[in-house]
Amino acid sequence: MAKWFYKLYNSIQSHKAVFVITLCLVFGALVWMASTLKFDEDISKLIPTTSENEQLQKVLNTVQFADKIIVNIEREDHGSTEDLTDYATEFLDSLSKRSSDYVKDVQGNIEDETIFETLDFVYTNAPLFLKEADYQQLANKLHPDSIAKITEGNYKTLISPSGIVAKKTIIKDPLGISLMGIKHLEQLGISDEFTLKDGFLVSKDEQHILLFINPKYPSSNTNENSVFSEQLYQLQEELNNAYSGKVKSSYFGGTLIAVANAKQIKSDIQLTVSIAMVLLMAVFIVFYKKLTIPIILFVPTIFGGLLAIATLSVIRTEISAISLGIGAVLLGVTLDYSLHILTHIRNNETVKELFDGVSKPILMSSLTTALAFLCLLFVDSQALQDLGIFAAISVIGASVFALIFIPQAYKGSSKADSKSTILDRMAAYDFHKNKLVIGGIAALLLLSAFTFHRVAFNKDISNLNFQPERIKSAEAALDKLINISSKSLYVVAFGTDEQHVLETNDGVFKILQELEQQQKLISYNSVGVLVASDKTQQDHIATWNHFWTADLKQKTQDELITNGTNFGFKPTTFQEFYKLLYHDFQPLSIEAYKTMNVIPIDDFIARDGDFMTISSVINVENSTIQHVKDAFKNSKNTLVIDRQAINETLLGHLKNDFNKLLGYCLIAVVLLLLLFYKNLRLTLVTVIPIIITWVVTIGIMGLFHLEFNIFNIIISTFIFGLGVDYSIFMTNGMRSGVASMTTHKTSIILSVLTTILGVGVLIFAKHPALHSLASISIIGILSAMFITFTIQPLLYKFLILKPKNGND
């Protein structure tokens, strides 16, 4: 291979213009191909999808987990109820003017006309809203003396100041049937502690008004929602100042949390990358004594990344943006190859000596690292498979390109380098001869045997969210008000036939009623109280027809006319009600129910093509969760979704997959090293430090109670890859002699410095996920370096040199 690269180098030297033009064309083509690829920002694509959870994933992708922004408008010491409603009115008016492009709708504000429309809908379809207990109450109302009292009460209401408002209802519904039906819709509401006042949901102590904003964009679209978030907080500041001491507001919701996370990640990355780039540029320029060194260093890495994205654009229509983001971090591996080549050139090796010294270890390292990344294909996660392909192609592409490009672009100094830098002195130091260092590593290895089992996998993604103080305080206030932090379960009926799904949901609703009677629930919201299957609706209509016999209809009409005459009512006053009694009722479609704007039916019913889900939300105590789940275990086409538990289960599968993955990686590396070295002892010299590095890394994490999570466990592949690189370069360096080993150690130290400055600076990040990436990276990379410098020479001496001397 060294001869091939040397011939190619000489050929390019003879045709530099052609090389430059070809390079520009290749980069242009790769950029164009990469630009055609679409990106999927769904973080759930990281979660493994298997045949076992395929149906669950389909339901999760269809269900509308309503991600509302809750606006809590709170009265202060000097405020009145009027101030509270005025604040809410101004808020809605301003929101409509400023943010209509970002708001789908707002719930919690009900106009008088909407109330009448809802009452009218319930009245017109009365049989569908009445329960068995209502018919007993209605039977009591139909006694002659009861009708007389009701008629007298209606008369007093009509002549009172409120008569104009009540007239519409009483004339059509003298017995109050619509009011009996509408009370059941409270099960779609938020809490018994709130009542409707002046068109708003006001707490019974009249201290709070709650509004619920449905954003137009999903919480994952942080670009659009960040603008909306700014508008909301600006409006809040203006109104809080205007009503200072009287009324204030606070916001809580997943959309705002997502925006806060995106902003914090952006802020953290800008700060840490700025620090890292300045320090890296300074180190590279000082060490290599050339201003253009940063460009030369990163060109192979950019080429590898572009080649990987271009390749993915051929085999995929879209890839996970999450995997590409993680892949960008993993590209630190590709800097190794550039650093090794640059360091050898800096030490005034000839081009032929350069290729003889680095081509084989670089290609070995890139192939073993690529093979380790390709083991991600064994994980049942689309995003992680994309990551494996991306990283593997990047690594191989960058290594080959570095061998071709860097010798053309970088020339070492013509004068002998004094090698007086601190990095050179550190590389020349014999760590394996220092008993304290050896004892320290041995002690860590022994300690790790007792601490590695402490390392847990944090399956709760919410722990990796960043929440500003204002969102935390808003959540705490809402928890006191409506118990927002209580455990929520989603019971989902699903299927492809609408009527079958509705019938399944009818069964869900009955079980929910039973659980409520058994006091196993705090509360529940179910559209089953409103929307039912045709079969259930026909049963309700049949119950109505059975109750309203021809004799009862006539008798009720006669009593209303007789008693009405005493108060001056005409015989035709309640004519609309008489028509209702003789109306031929039919089941309603879901679309018909949606005409009631006051009920957010789309929050409960969702479709994806012909697949349909109907969700109910349950608030429970932790002690009754299992009882609730057991109540639905025999229900067909029904899932009880505990979002946290499901994430924990699926992410637990991801952890198990990674345990297997590390085994696959190790087997792949061992086989490839055996193929290259054709020597078991050399392979052991290279592999044992990798295993020790992993054990020590886990042990140190256990010692400091650091946890793995969905993000930093992926970085373990990165650490494994760098550990492989360091071991291979040390083995090849030791085989080539002391001078070569020192050069290899210098490039490894540069790689460690680069990685710690590039990823390790995230230790200063405020975002929990980024912070966790940094800590495991620093521990893993430093462990890999010291173990490689210390243990590997001892193994080489014991397994390679001693047997040779013995043979001599």
Image: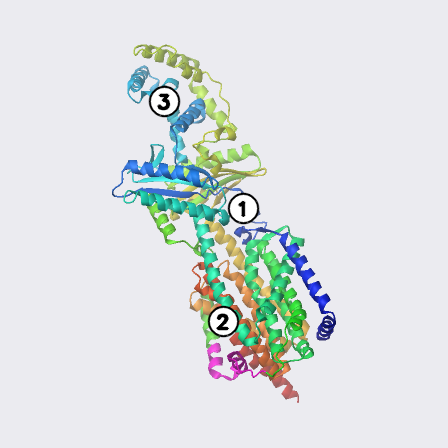
Sequence order check: which comes first, mark 3 or mark 1?
A: 1
Does 440 sit left or right of 164 as displayed?
right
Q: Is residue 57 above or below residue 664?
A: above
Task: Name the quadrant of the N terminus.
Answer: bottom right
Residue position for label 3: 176
List the residue tagged with mark 2: 696
Q: What is the C-alpha distance between the residues marked 1 and 2? A: 38 Å
Distance, label 3 to label 1, CA atoms, is 44 Å
Give the magenta-colored segment's residue range. 417-442
- Farthest-out residue, left: 78
Amino acid type shown at disc 2: Val
Is residue 14 something one can see in this rendering? yes
Instruction: Tell me residue 507's x, y (percent).
Output: 48, 35
The x and y percentages for residue 481 are: 33, 43
Decide whether residue 125 is among the magenta residues.
no
Task: Say which mark, if any, is on residue 56.
Answer: 1
In the depicted structure, whether residue 490 falls above or below residue 740: above
User: Mark 3 packing: few (<14 Cα in 10 Å), some, or many (20+)?
Assistant: some
